[in-house]
Image (cartoon, grey):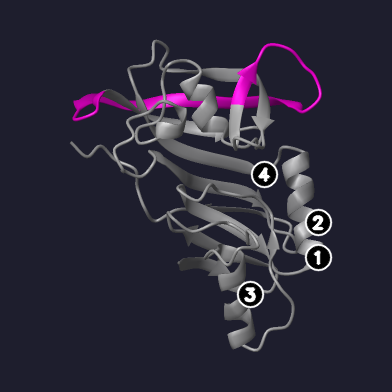
Amino acid sequence: MKTLYEDKDIIVIDKPVGILSQSDGKGSENCEDILNACMADKGEKGKVYLIHRLDRNVGGVMVFAKNKAAAASLSAQIQNKTFIKEYVALVHSVLEETEGVFEDLLFKDSRKNKTFVVNRMRKGVKDAKLSYKVLETCDSKYGQVSLVHIRLYTGRTHQIRVQFASRKMPLVGDGKYGGSDNGADIGLRSYRLTFVHPSEKKAVVFRTEGELTFSG
């Protein structure tokens, strides 16, 4: 797990695929425990605070707070939608519109650990919004695919995966939501984060060092 930036308030990492964002209480490898152990090894007191999550099978840039004040600042920015999260995704099919906005109502079924698009607001349903822009399309071993840049305006469970899948454009490798389930990693990466630094009060931008590209 590579550290992209660290100071007294925040630590920004490039999360590997296959590692949980936080502890599941079952001893699974996770970023939260790894970072806490690293802080302890360096003689730093305290612990990291989770600000946002990535699915286990999604990698890319994440930020953790190192104190309560920084956590409160970053969490407020997420609530105010000034914390900008951008992704790149590899999706099946060619999108009819090269850019646009998806807005849906999502319901998470905790028993199935799966999210669904629904048509009315009710208990447990949350609004979801993202915008996208197609970067490239081509033929591949998965058929026709599109590389898409995405900005998230809300952070719902499996949001990108289910919003694209509900429009018959599942992510490559995402068998849970109808993509090619061939053992490959899901075609999704947290690409860039933009937010105001908690103590320096200026905008900062961090991006992943990895890239999501066509592979055949």
Q: Earlier in the sequence, mark 4 or mark 1?
A: 1
User: What is the crowding at mark 1: few (fewer than 14 residues within 10 Å), some, or many (at least 20)?
Assistant: some
4 or 157, which lies in front? 157
- Magenta residue span: 116-143
Residue under label 2, please give it. Answer: 72
Element at badge 4? Answer: loop
Question: CA gap, disc 3 to disc 1?
Answer: 15 Å
Question: CA gap, disc 4 to disc 2?
Answer: 13 Å
- Asked if residue 134 lies left or right of residue 26, the reply is left
Checking the image for residue 83, the label placed there is 4
Residue under label 3, please give it. Answer: 36
Residue at 47%, 45% in the rendered image = 191
Q: Earlier in the sequence, mark 3 or mark 2?
A: 3
Checking the image for residue 68, the label placed there is 1
Residue type indicated by callout 2: Ala
Residue at 76%, 69% in the rendered image = 67
User: What is the crowding at mark 3: few (fewer than 14 residues within 10 Å), some, or many (at least 20)?
Assistant: some
Residue type indicated by callout 4: Phe
Residue type indicated by callout 3: Asn
